[in-house]
Image (cartoon, rainbow, N blue to C red):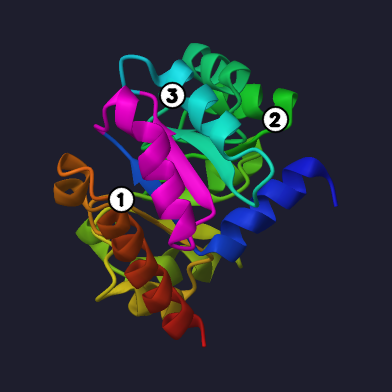
Amino acid sequence: MTKKGDIQQRIVDSGVTAVLRGIDEDDIVPVAEAIHEGGVTALEVTADAKRCSEMIADVDRAMEGTDAVVGAGTVMDAAAARNVIEAGAQFVLAPNLNEDVIDVCNREGVVCIPGVMTPTEAAEAMEAGADILKMFPASTVGPGHIGALQGPLGDIPIMPTGGVSADNVAEYFDAGAVAVGAGSALVDYDAIEREDWDGVRESAAAFVEAIENARS
């Protein structure tokens, strides 16, 4: 398996990508470590942070030697894609479909997960070389939209994100999701505010348990 294929498989095996948004630079490493200890191996640092490249690099160094994969989210254009990949991002996500971002990722051998909603967007993303499709925002359309996309397009890999929680994650996997993305439903921001890293870990572990139950 290629390195890119291995990263994609680890994202799928993780079952969830933790969306680390709005976290202070000083907290990003302990938060990432706690979430990884909770069983999440795919960690997404969002590119809308002021020092996202430095934060990605810090998390990447902290996770060295573990099974974690570190990526970047909210990557809206080719320039941002190049910056986060240079910082060490092993996968790139976006809320939208930008074929220039897909091109950069493919040239660099990095997993690309663009945001789609319609069959047209999904087909265009796969034709452009996307690896997984981020169905966003998932709460707008619900689990049934996965089958609506896969029906005419075949067994395309879909990662619903936005509104996915431990309470409804089983519905998304039952509908055909290969993995999900989760932010506040997985990341305990109140615990982060208190620097309660055990609380952060426990919140992540509870979400992972819900995924394991959904997949069993």
Q: Residue furthest bottom?
A: 216
Total label count?
A: 3
| Residue 25 x %, y % | 33, 24
Q: Is residue 27 magenta?
A: yes
Looking at the image, can residue 176 be seen? yes
Which of the pair 17/161 is nearer the observer? 17
- The residue under the point 48% across, 53% down is 36
- Identify the amino acid type marked 1: Trp
- Mark found first going from the N terminus, 1 or 3: 3
Mark 1, residue position: 197
- The residue under the point 37% across, 15% down is 51
- The residue under the point 48% across, 68% down is 177
- Mark found first going from the N terminus, 1 or 2: 2
| Residue 20 x %, y % | 34, 40
Mark 2, residue position: 106
In the structure shown, which secondary structural element does the residue marked by tag 3 occupy? helix
Give the vertical position of 12 relative to 197 (above or below). below
- Identify the amino acid type marked 3: Met
Mark 3, residue position: 55
- Identify the amino acid type marked 2: Asn
Q: Which residues make up the magenta segment?
A: 22-47
Which of the pair 151/180 is nearer the observer? 180
Q: Residue furthest right?
A: 1
- The residue under the point 61% across, 25% down is 88
**3D distance between C-alphas at marks 3 and 2:** 23 Å
**3D distance between C-alphas at marks 1 and 3:** 18 Å
Q: Residues within 10 Å of mark 3 (few under 14, many from 20)?
A: many
| Residue 182 x %, y % | 33, 54
- Mark found first going from the N terminus, 3 or 2: 3
